Amino acid sequence: MFVRFCAAIACVVFGSAHAAQPATYPVKPVRIIVPFAAAGGSDIMARSLAQALTASTGQQFVVENRPGANALIGTEAVAKAAPDGYTLLLTTNIFTINPWLYPNVPFNVERDFAPITLAGSTPNLLAVHPSIPVKNVKELIALAQARPGQLTIAAAGLGTPSHLAAELLKQSARIDLLIIQYKGTGSTLNDLIGGQVALSFGTLAGLAPFAKSGRVRALAVSGSKRAASMPDVPTTAETLPGFDVLTWYGLFAPVATPREIIVRLHGEIVKAQATADVKQRLIAQGFDADGNTPEQFTEVIRRDLARWQKVIAEAKIRVE
């Protein structure tokens, strides 16, 4: 499958001359489709970028939320859009998870999209209720080994990043945790704070205030480096080498979008990420502005596709 993906990227990078667009792009409003409801992390990221892109290009970049079917509806809309640079997708790493969850995804992530850039990312925070007698990941593993199948860990829905982070923790540490599925992050947070579940992976922005107030205990961040906002909290990888789970946010166009447009969008987004206003807004939400090239973003996608295929297959997760 990755061979086809590379071919698609090459098509974008070395697009034929007849596909070239005027250097004046954009000449009309650009839609950024977010396949999630308003007010979430992806919506915040999209609106921050849209505001900066509108200011820098002189054309409106308009965010359109199309939630539903675990992001499949909005993502399909972009896959089928005209490859002219006026319909873009801003999504999360659910993009690399869905192909392994659903038997009939209505698009091919390796064939139908042109990566533009990684717009930003945030680690998850692994936290426990204060009643659980552990202070770090090593103690958590020991307790789980002593109580196989008894410690509960909340997940924000089947196949969500919090669910797969929990599955990866189980597999990496070779422990048996009881995963409890919820419908959204709000419910997981409420039950973690209330002590109905023992632990959970949650967004840094969502969990950090409760960790700082003592209502939950922060054990580790899920990324490969410590979070600037919580430097005293270790990474999971400090106990389980190689553990690295981020929620990333990336921008895509339909695959046949001309190279000139991809280059323009990439440059404008990198410029936007460097502005003080966008930086401040993203940092306040716990995001790192991780702009990279289309080629580097392709490597992120390739890595995630391989990893989540393995995790999902081993956990036998399937959505019918």
Image (cartoon, grey):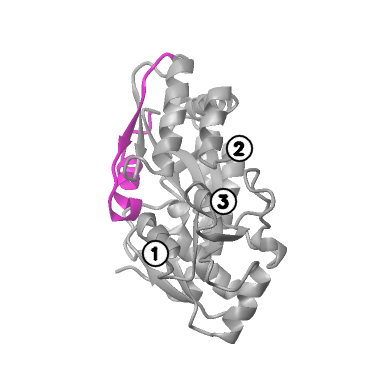
In the drawing, does residue 239 fall left or right of residue 51? Answer: right
Residue at label 2?
292
The span from disc 1 to disc 2 (Cα, nearest Å) is 37 Å
- Residue type, mark 1 in image: Asp
Q: Quadrant of residue 172?
A: bottom right
Mark 2 secondary-structure assignment: loop
* Marks 1 and 3 in Cβ contact (< 8 Å): no
Tell me the distance, in whole angstroms, between the alpha carbons under discs 1 and 3.
Answer: 18 Å
- Which element carries disc 3, helix, strand or loop? helix
Q: Is residue 62 magenta?
A: yes
- Judged left or right of residue 193, residue 263 is right
**For mark 3, what is the residue?**
212
Badge 2 crowding class, 10 Å Cα cut-off, few under 14, some 14 to 19, many 20 or more, is some
Name the residue: 32% across, 47% down: 76
In the picture shown, does residue 170 fall above or below 225? below
Residue 144 located left or right of residue 202: right
Residue at left offset 34%, top offset 18%: 28
Magenta range is 58-84
Q: Nearer the viewer, mark 1 or mark 2?
A: 1
Amino acid of disc 2 = Asn
Which mark, by number, is residue 191?
1
- Residue 298 can be seen in this image: yes
Q: Which of the two labelled residues, at mark 1 and mark 2, occupies the earlier sequence position?
A: 1
Residue that appears at 57% across and 80% down: 144
Viewer-side residue, 62 vs 301: 62
Labels 3 and 2: the sequence-earlier one = 3
Closest to the observer, 274 or 198: 198
Where residue 165 appears, x then y in whole percent?
Answer: 52, 63
Is 156 inside the magenta-drawn segment?
no
Determine the image quadrant of residue 158: bottom left
Q: Nearer the viewer, residue 199 or 250?
A: 199
